[in-house]
Image (cartoon, helix red, strand yellow):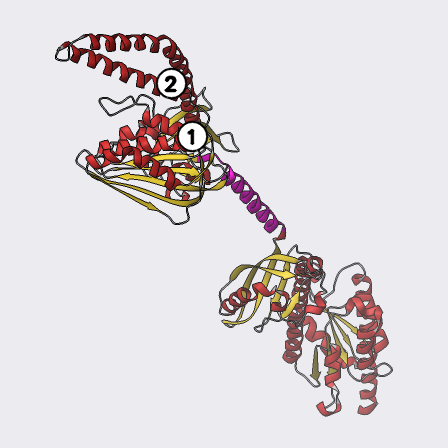
Amino acid sequence: MNVDDNKGKGEQFHQKNEKSLHDIENYIFDHIYKSGRSLSLNSTTADRDNKKMILLIDDDPDMIEVGRKIIISAGYNFLSAKDGLEGIDFILKYKPDLILLDYMMPGIDGVEVFQRLVTNQRFRHLSDTPVIMLTAKNDYELDRGSLFEMGLSAFLIKPFGHRELINVIDNVFILNQVKKKNKELEQKIKRSEYKYQDLIENANDIIFTLNLKGDFMILNRRLTTLTGFSREDWMGRSFFDLVAPEDRVDARINFQKAIQGKARIFECRIICQNGFPLFLSMNINPIFERAEVVGLVGIARDITQRKELEQENIELKNFNESIIQSIYAGLITLDLDRKITSFNSGAEDVLGYKSEEVIGKNIDDVIPKEESKRLVPEIIPPDHSNIRRELETTRKNGSKVTIGYTLTPRIDNYGLKVGHIISFRDISQIKQMQSEVLRMDRLASLGVLASGLAHEVRNPIAGIKIIAQTLEEDFEVNDTRREYLGRIIAQVNRLDELLRTLFSYAKPREPNLKKYQLETIIKEVLILIEDRIKKSGIEFETKLSESLPSVFVDFHQIQQIFINLFINAIEAMESGGKLIVEAAPIETQLQPKDRRNARFAVTKKSEYIRVKVIDNGKGIDQEAVNRIFDPFFTTKATGTGLGLSIVYRIVEDHKGDISVESESGKGTTFTILLPTEE
């Protein structure tokens, strides 16, 4: 046998042995791998379980042998297939961790195997298995781009070295691991995106993003729910077009501040599709990229119901306030520190203060402390929930007013005492009515007394006067006893005059009302007292307006008024002076005052003549002014105290008014309102 024969036989033997080795390897692997274990020819059974399996598909036995040695020596499990069909079968059967695939093979080449692996649904569970293509072709003969687009992990050009193959395999495993992790991260990101997208879409608030121009970039479905608008219609449109016109200026100001990097919270209205406004609380925040604002993200919460409740509360507060302010009675509330927390218009009218003057002040600083302690005692017995009293207190101008008040504890929603409520009324009119009733009782008693005096006293007095006059005639002219009789007669006359005055006051006659000219009445009075005025050295002056209307009065009773007032003025000017009578028409509401300056109820507006009787005499002190119209009150040594009382009664019977202003040493002014019509 020659060398060539020997060589041929050697190759046949080698091929036969290679085939036998390949069959044995596959047999062992088939039976052991099916039991769930991987195989390495130079590793223990315990080590094989955690090693990765690499499948080499190649029609070159030498390449399979070399590959087996390299891969096993690198610590991987090895499996081989001699052609494409067997490779496909092994891929489905053993699910290798990596595939080394020869580009050129008889029958089904590597490209077709790879295409089936990628496109066939039978391999979908192996779609992530990395594939390394082995080829001896040059770069310009390969369409690498399309294979890489299909998912090929790497190309390895033959021939390659031991280290080069292992490096490529290790790198592909590393890259595949990274790819798997990236895929897992992508899936997590997608799940997170779906989760947050779901949260955003189903949020109870409108969530949106804006670009730097204020256009909508993202909008969730809550916009449609709240406004009725389709969110697709608003994508790319301006946010400000959605805002109500009256709120756009404020919205733009907040938008500009937000794109400058400042988060903003503000409220605005948007107009819904049905035309009704929707109140939103806006929270917009800048979106930063590389320290620059690239847009805004906003959350808008529907606060329409809250706004409606706030408006209802405001309206209820205003309603309650209007009720409190419209109450005729005064109402003051205090906290536990005695500070004023509310002061209604009724309190303003009675006490003369404005609410803004006293709110927040201590009640002791508004009302004199002695009076405020009576109004709100510092210690209130617990069994006295309400206190009802009367109090004369001081107004802002220093005058006095009598109030009837109720002090009630102020209780909060938890049943705790938080202050006091003082409700009060001006009872000066009631006091005046009581005074008038008392005066009427006095007049009634005076009438009874006068009637009795008329019958029981005047007859004896008349007898005394007649006897005295008779005795006076019996004495001689020069008899000193005639002087005593003259004095008796004078005192009897004075007593008779007093009785006539008393009887006239107690039982006045009804006034006979007719129209008269005031000037005529004054002239008649002047005729009666003209001599007395001249003897007293008094200058008399009248200032009557032109075209005075007639007064509707009883001539003789009004004459009596002026006689009384003129005589009082003359007596007040002992050293002479000036007496002035002024008269002018006036249209006013009759507001008569009693002798303590408390007012009666106001009547309708009517036309009167206002007459002023002015003197510059010695005047009257304030205490006397307050009592000047009281019956039997007089400042004269010989006065009866009935003259001004009669004047007051006559004016009252004429439905007029009389008042007096005087100051000691500076004179006196009486002001009378006389009616011009019935």
Question: For the stretch drawn in magenta, what is the main secondary structure?
Answer: helix
Q: Is residue 381 visible in this depiction of the protein?
A: no
295 vs 548, left or right, is right
User: Hey, which quadrant is residue 68 in on the image?
Assistant: bottom right
At a point 19% along the width and 35% down the height, the residue shown is 535
Q: Amino acid at mark 1?
A: Glu
How many C-alpha atoms fall within 10 Å of the one at disc 2: few (<14), some, or many (≥20)? Answer: many
Asked if residue 258 is positioned above or below residue 579 in the image, the reply reads below
Q: Is residue 562 visible in this depiction of the protein?
A: yes
User: Hey, which quadrant is residue 342 in on the image?
Assistant: top left
Picture coordinates of residue 26, whole percent (x, y): 81, 69
**Viewer-proximal residue, 15 or 499?**
499
How many C-alpha atoms fall within 10 Å of the one at disc 1: few (<14), some, or many (≥20)? Answer: few
Q: Which residues are magenta?
A: 305-332
At a point 73% along the width and 82% down the height, the residue shown is 134
638 vs 225, left or right, is left
Q: Amino acid at mark 2?
A: Phe
Regarding mark 2 in the picture, which secondary structure is present there?
helix
Regarding mark 1 in the picture, which secondary structure is present there?
helix
State the residue position of label 2: 503
305 vs 440, left or right, is right
Is residue 319 located in the magenta-colored stretch of the structure?
yes
User: Hey, which quadrant is residue 330 in on the image?
Assistant: top left
Asked if residue 228 is positioned above or below residue 590 in the image, the reply reads below
Asked if residue 541 is positioned above or below residue 169 in the image, the reply reads above
Q: Of label 2 and label 1, which has the lower sequence position?
A: 2
Is residue 520 located in the magenta-colored stretch of the structure?
no
Distance in Å between CA atoms under marks 2 and 1: 18 Å
Picture coordinates of residue 323, whole percent (x, y): 54, 39
Quadrant in the picture for the N terminus = bottom right
Picture coordinates of residue 128, whole percent (x, y): 74, 69
State the residue position of label 1: 652
